[in-house]
Amino acid sequence: MARKPEGPLRRGWTTGACAAAAARAAYQALLTGTFPEQVTIRLPKGDAPSFRIEKRALGEGWAEAGIVKDAGDDPDVTHGALILTRIEHGPAGSGLAFRAGTGVGTVTRAGLPLPPGEPAINPGPRRYIGWALEDAAAECDGPTLLDLVVTISIPGGADLALKTLNSRLGIIGGLSVLGTTGIVVPYSCASWIHSIHRGIDVARAAGIDHLAAATGSTSEAAVRQLYGLSEQALLDMGDFVGGTLKYLKAHPVAKLTLAGGFAKIAKLAAGHLDLHSSRSQVETAALARLLGDLGAPTEAVAEAAAAAGAGEILAIARSLGPDFEAALTRRIATQARDVALANLAGETAIEVAIFDRAGGLLTRIGP
């Protein structure tokens, strides 16, 4: 994750909001033959942002407009992408039909908000794209019944999608058009948490009863090999333990393995549910005291108290012998599991597994 800049942060607009603005501009051109320089759209929370039209194309029975996405100060993978919306007349009585153009994915698995075969244009954006088209019709004296085909394209979207979890979720061929509110809140990590939630949905729909949520790629590969899990059973949790547990509380599975390195799991053991370094720190003093409780010599405890991080403390425990390392990792895994269970309080059984930097299993606690 990119480092958060200092000072006030500028909001941005989702792909859904950009697609809605482009839809309004394109439909106005289809009705009048002329594109506006900019358009204003309505969003679910009452915001009414304006967008400059960057690309225009008009043909027989169709019009297309493009908006360059501005994600504000958020490190969004689609910041600067061109969002194109093409509007065409559909058959009478057909209503609004949505199509995936170049760079927009198609849903292939059950469990997502849209059924397999549908373009990955989420229900929220579909709703306010409809509002944008209604507003264009009202402004230009167009028909009140909208029988239109809406095709959204994102040039280069297939390559950008490789940086997302779309393929794991069963969204193939490009990006998703997202945005429940239409607003990008900088560093809220909404898209990452959204992917975790959808991963749980897809796994549940596939009947998978054991999921593994990992803090990083090493622990993910290790826990996958340990249990022989399918890709659909893996959640790229990153630092968002809280967001994962909260969603599982309402959408349980039989078993969840929380997998991570010693430092991340030590943060969870201390009660932190956001493990990012900017929002939580390893409590070295507490780890040093724990070593003392386990019977470590005074000098080792003092060395641990002065350590720069959890890795140094684990190395100190290892130098005291395998029993100390095992006892320390077991205690941390147990405490982390207790924290997870207290925040889950649902039907999902919890296991915590700690791996070393090479992916070797140090300990696992749970059913």
Image (cartoon, grey):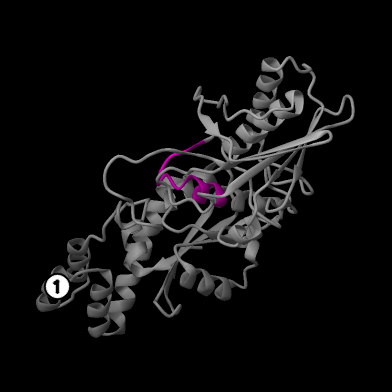
Q: Is residue 192 magenta?
A: yes
The reply to whether residue 304 is in sight is yes
x and y, in percent, of residue 86 in the image = 73, 39
Nearest the camera: 297 or 231? Answer: 231
From the viewer's perspective, is residue 325 above or below residue 43? below
**Residue 269 found in image quarter:** bottom left
Instruction: Residue at 49%, 69% (x, y): give it.
Output: 217
Residue pointed to by mark 1? 301
**Residue 177 found in image quarter:** top right
Is disc 1 surrounded by few (<14), some (14 to 19) or many (20+) residues within 10 Å? many
Report the amino acid beneath label 1: Val
- Please report the bounds of the magenta region as a residue range: 183-195
Left/right of residue 67 with respect to residue 118 in the rendered view: left
Nearest the camera: 313 or 321? Answer: 313
**Residue 303 found in image quarter:** bottom left
x and y, in percent, of residue 354 in the image = 41, 70
